[in-house]
């Protein structure tokens, strides 16, 4: 049984069916892999409806001081703030804190249940423990997770139901305040065990004119924050040192009736200003042991509701839009509240200048956010680059201005304007945008970045690190002998690896995307970084790399990455250490010409060996980040369509020749020249998944066509829109058409058309469809910034997929045909679209070819 999160008719607590093997009262009905619980109720429709409550644009912050209470209750660690100098004029802030300080969320791993000799968290996440306390009251909280409790090592074994799932989804919807402290007249002591009864809460709601709706976020003001703020230092010290037996805190009462109320109203979350939301000591049955592990209902504690209560009283309105961004830390049992947004959205003083972005005559038309100031940021976080199409759906501007806090962005949706931008490259810069991202991803030192930035845009000639590196990449990876050598090496490595798969009647059952990730990582590392590459010396680093890749966005945000992006951070540092050793031990001298030249150039321009090694992290991503998902989608687009699979196999026969002893050779050069359906399928697959935006920084005020672009703005050419534009690609632009690139020529009559990385002179029969400007195909960039590795990428992907199609049959583990998996297309993209979830497959040797040894070659490749 699964619940529909958009439904307004959901079962009462008394009507919940029993889940076999689950604790009594469990409501795990959102899916077996669900990590959101009641946050599933925050559907786009409910969030959009809540946003309509924004009328006056007033802002209320709900974050209490991060260092309060001081000292903290329950014997917890005090908040510590250290300022660390950074160079001569900079400073960093270091926080050492328990996330239960200040305003925070209790996550689903904060409290578990004892059930069948396991600690069970929400949705069945569990850890077996033989030394459990018999009752929750027996837990010695002053000793944290030692003694009778689940150990920290056991907690770390899984990150399921960690706070990162909330951070990814976001918490945004209709908030409802029950100002019980104001309703009661404040006639009790919040530092007492005053229990707020259900009847009192209901009377308060009635007095305020509040009616609850499914998905509401319920806030209850008990008066704790107001009372604590009035205490002097001596009184705070006394309260903070109270023992468990002496500590008393007002809050919502426990008991069956309150549980029915909280469950049956289907609140998405509850929160209050009290340290435990419910009264302390807990009344039985305690709310925490139902809301968190049984229902998956987040509990917010110690929120500062004072200003909100006053605002609601003044306006006589107790409903509002509210948004929260929990910390994106995998496996976190609880979270500080990074941002609480109420009535509209909290905007920090440090970005105040962003509130006054002006719009000059002649600039592209401006699209204002539905939620003032940061609505566009929230939209991009929630929808990824799809947001560029969502906000422009009605107006269909070819270029528009998107104001986001302290900067302006110009979003380009027209291939004609994209081509004009490509020709105006002297006024626009790529490196000014991307190098700051590179610094955050690699953690290169300021002294290294200073070397990188010297004459970065070649405005003073062709000297400097980046101009030199740019020329080297284009030379080594352009059509020539070095590319031939690299391609032949990759063909040999692929052949060796794939010939070991499913031999002797065996079969391989695996997650297809994960298998391609691993195979490409080992193969590319060997062909590009040589036989003594880090993955060859330590295969576990492949997993470290993909941990880094999966968390790159959090590293780019760069807020305490060792905490907020811990898995990605640890993966990066493991890879960095190995690459530093690789450079220091001179193993790069056995690598491909590309790596030999690259490291030599970095060292000659002043990089230390350590920084030269660390800088290779970004090249590893460049090599693997797009090639792997591209390969996955091209393969699955074919094997999920039996007719297309048969036609492409028949076409590929022209590239197959016999070899002695029952072997067969697949010739890459023949594929590229004589297999138009296969190559067209490759390009159409790339078009469908090409969600990346081409970035440029406006160096000086300039005019593109009729549009005035301001200095220091950022341009994004929205590939995801251009690739699916029916005016450019036809009315079937949202459909997969494997023959789209077979017939027709690129529009040479279009004066705005120019090469964009799709090499129209390659020896294949496939071209752009008639009337489609080359700037409409964005996969490899365009203008002066075209991916230098595009030839190698096409060769390795076509060869790898051709081998799999000719040598293997791929099906689901139960033998049924493959279906195309869903796309994970709502993330902020750093690579092309990836599949959503695992895709389990069975790989067998192809029937009739079980004993054939296949080999990839690149004879005639140029």
Image (cartoon, rainbow, N blue to C red):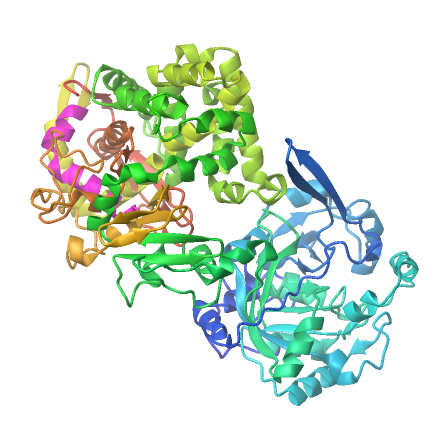
Q: Quadrant of residue 179?
A: bottom right
- Judged by its main secondary structure, the magenta piece is helix
Q: Position of residue 2 (x, y in %)?
A: 47, 67
* Residue sitting at x 28%, y 44%: 636
Residues rendered magenta in the picture: 668-691
**Horizontal relation, residue 650 to residue 398: left or right:** left
Above or below, 32 relative to 520:
below
**Horizontal relation, residue 768 to residue 382: left or right:** left
* Residue sitting at x 46%, y 23%: 535
Q: Position of residue 625 (x, y in %)?
A: 38, 36
**Does the image show residue 818?**
no
Q: Position of residue 80 (x, y in %)?
A: 77, 45
Q: Is residue 689 magenta?
A: yes
Above or below, 266 relative to 801:
below
* Residue sitting at x 17%, y 57%: 727
Q: Is residue 326 magenta?
A: no
Which image quarter is the C terminus in?
top left
**Horizontal relation, residue 303 to residue 806: left or right:** right
Nearer the observer, 623 or 373: 373
Q: Quadrant of residue 26?
A: bottom right
Above or below, 178 relative to 591:
below
* Residue sitting at x 7%, y 45%: 749
Q: Position of residue 611 (x, y in %)?
A: 52, 22
């Amino acid at each position: 049984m699964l619940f529909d999160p958009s439904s307004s008719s959901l079962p009462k607590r008394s009507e919940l069916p029993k889940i076999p093997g689950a604790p009594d009262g469990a409501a795990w009905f959102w899916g077996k892999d669900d990590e959101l619980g009641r946050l599933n109720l925050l559907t786009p429709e409910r969030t959009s409806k809540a946003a309509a409550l924004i009328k006056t644009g007033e802002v209320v912050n709900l974050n209490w001081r991060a260092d309060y209470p001081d000292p903290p209750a329950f014997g917890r660690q005090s908040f510590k703030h250290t300022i660390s100098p950074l160079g001569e004029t900079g400073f960093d802030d270091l926080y050492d804190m328990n996330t239960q300080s200040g305003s925070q969320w209790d996550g689903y791993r904060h409290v578990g249940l004892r059930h069948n000799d396991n600690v069970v968290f929400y949705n069945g996440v569990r850890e077996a423990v033989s030394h459990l306390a018999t009752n929750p009251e027996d837990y010695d909280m002053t000793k944290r997770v030692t003694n009778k409790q689940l150990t920290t090592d056991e907690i770390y074994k899984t990150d399921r139901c960690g706070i990162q799932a909330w951070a990814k989804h976001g918490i945004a919807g209709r908030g409802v305040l029950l100002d019980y402290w104001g309703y009661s007249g404040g006639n009790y002591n919040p530092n007492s065990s005053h229990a707020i009864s259900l009847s009192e809460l209901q009377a308060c709601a009635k007095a305020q004119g509040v009616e609850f709706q499914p998905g509401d976020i319920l806030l209850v003001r008990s008066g704790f924050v107001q009372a604590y703020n009035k205490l002097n230092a001596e009184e705070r010290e006394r309260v903070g040192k109270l023992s468990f037996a002496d500590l008393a805190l007002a809050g919502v009462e426990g008991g069956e009736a309150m549980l029915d109320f909280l469950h049956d109203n289907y609140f998405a979350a509850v929160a209050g200003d009290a340290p435990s939301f419910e009264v302390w000591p807990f009344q039985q049955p305690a709310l925490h042991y139902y809301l968190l592990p049984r229902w998956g209902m987040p509990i917010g504690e110690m929120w500062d509701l004072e200003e909100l209560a006053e605002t609601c009283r003044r306006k006589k309105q107790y409903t509002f839009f509210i948004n929260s961004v929990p910390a994106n830390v995998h496996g976190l049992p609880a979270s500080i509240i990074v941002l609480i947004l109420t009535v509209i959205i909290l905007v920090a003083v440090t970005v105040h200048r962003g509130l006054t972005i002006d719009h000059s005559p002649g600039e592209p038309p401006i699209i204002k956010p539905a939620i003032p100031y940061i609505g566009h940021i929230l939209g991009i976080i929630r929808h990824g680059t799809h947001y560029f199409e969502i906000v422009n759906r009605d107006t269909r501007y070819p270029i528009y201005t998107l104001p986001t806090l302290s900067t302006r962005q110009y979003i380009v949706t027209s291939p004609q304007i994209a081509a004009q931008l490509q020709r105006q490259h002297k006024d626009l810069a790529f490196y000014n945008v991307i190098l700051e991202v590179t610094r955050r991803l690699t953690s290169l030192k300021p002294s290294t970045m200073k070397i990188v930035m010297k004459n970065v845009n070649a405005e003073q000639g062709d000297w400097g690190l980046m101009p030199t590196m740019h020329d080297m990449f284009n030379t080594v990876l352009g059509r020539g002998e070095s590319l031939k050598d690299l391609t032949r090496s990759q063909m040999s490595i692929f052949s060796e690896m794939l010939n070991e798969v499913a031999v002797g009647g065996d079969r391989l059952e695996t997650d297809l995307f994960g298998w391609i990730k691993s195979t490409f990582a080992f193969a590319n590392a060997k062909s590009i970084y040589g036989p003594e590459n880090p993955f060859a010396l330590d295969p576990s680093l492949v997993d470290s790399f993909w941990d880094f890749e999966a968390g790159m966005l959090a590293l780019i945000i760069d807020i305490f990455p060792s905490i907020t992006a811990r898995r990605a951070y640890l993966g990066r540092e493991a890879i960095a250490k190995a690459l530093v050793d690789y450079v220091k031990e001179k193993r790069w001298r056995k690598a491909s010409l590309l790596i030999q030249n690259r490291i030599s150039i970095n060292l000659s321009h002043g990089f230390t060996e350590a920084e030269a090694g660390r800088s290779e992290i970004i090249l590893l991503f460049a090599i693997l980040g797009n090639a792997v998902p591209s390969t996955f989608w091209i393969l699955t687009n074919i094997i999920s369509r039996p007719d297309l699979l048969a036609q492409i196999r028949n076409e590929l026969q022209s590239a197959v020749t016999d070899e002695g002893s029952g072997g067969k050779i697949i010739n890459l050069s023949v594929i590229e020249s004589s297999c138009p359906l296969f190559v067209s399928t490759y390009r159409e697959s790339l078009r469908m998944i090409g969600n990346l935006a081409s970035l440029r920084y406006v160096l000086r005020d300039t005019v593109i066509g009729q549009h005035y672009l301001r200095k220091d703005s950022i341009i994004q050419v929205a590939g995801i829109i251009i690739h699916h534009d029916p005016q450019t690609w036809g009315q079937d632009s949202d459909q997969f058409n494997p023959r789209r690139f077979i017939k027709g020529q690129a529009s040479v009559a279009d004066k705005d058309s120019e090469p964009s990385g799709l090499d129209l002179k390659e020896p294949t029969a496939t071209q752009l469809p008639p009337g489609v400007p080359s700037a409409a195909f964005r996969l490899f960039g365009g203008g002066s910034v075209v991916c230098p590795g595009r030839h190698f990428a096409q060769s390795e992907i076509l060869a790898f997929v051709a081998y799999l199609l000719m040598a293997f049959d791929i099906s689901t583990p139960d033998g049924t045909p493959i279906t195309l998996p869903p796309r994970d297309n709502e993330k902020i993209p750093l690579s092309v679209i990836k599949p959503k979830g695992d895709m389990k497959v069975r790989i067998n040797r192809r029937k009739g070819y079980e004993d054939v040894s296949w080999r990839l070659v690149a004879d005639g490749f140029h």
